[in-house]
Image (tube, rainbow, N blue to C red):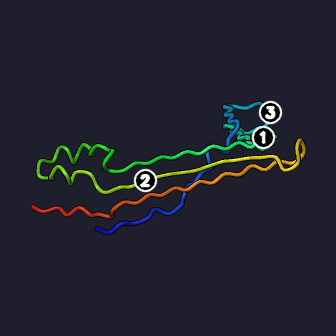
Amino acid sequence: MQFTTKSQENVGMNPESVSELSIKTYPNAEYGSGGGNVVSIVTKSGTNHWHGDAYGYYNSEKLNAADWLANASPGIAQDARRGPTHEGEVGAAGGEPIIKDKLFVFGTWDRYHYRTVSSAAIWTR
């Protein structure tokens, strides 16, 4: 079995760093004359008190059901119907004052991990 690691493509903003999210459809002249949508994201900032958050997400083949085609094929053994997949994401955010009421610090950390097995189908008659 050969495991591969998925690259960090399409990595978005850490969800713990978002304070406010606004989506406007068909905005007025304030945003220009073109059609479309406007997405505004306001990030969190530090406060006069230390605060922090942490989160985690994990997914593997042990937690997932096999897809419909694998279940519909009687020739596939029950334990081989799900390919080895491991996906996880952990993150944290924290902020604190440096100078009370004047200077604050806030930071986030996020790690995404995805591992799966490369496979190929071989059709025979």
Question: Which residue corresponds to the image point at 46% horizontal and 52% vertical from the top-left?
Answer: 88
Decide which of 3, 97 is in the foreground and name it: 97
Dot 1 and dot 2 residues touching (CB under 8 Å): no
User: Identity of the amino acid at label 2?
Assistant: Glu
- Say whether disc 2 or disc 3 marks the residue closer to the N-terminus: 3
Q: Which mark is residue 87?
A: 2
Towards the viewer: 96 or 87 = 96
Secondary element type, mark 3: helix
Q: Residue furthest right?
A: 102
Q: Residue beneath label 3, please?
A: 29
Q: Is residue 82 shown above or below 43?
A: below
| Residue labelled with disc 1 | 49
Q: Residues within 10 Å of mark 2 (few under 14, many from 20)?
A: some
- Between disc 1 and disc 2, the foreground one is 1
Amino acid bearing label 1: His
x then y, percent, for residue 35: 69, 37
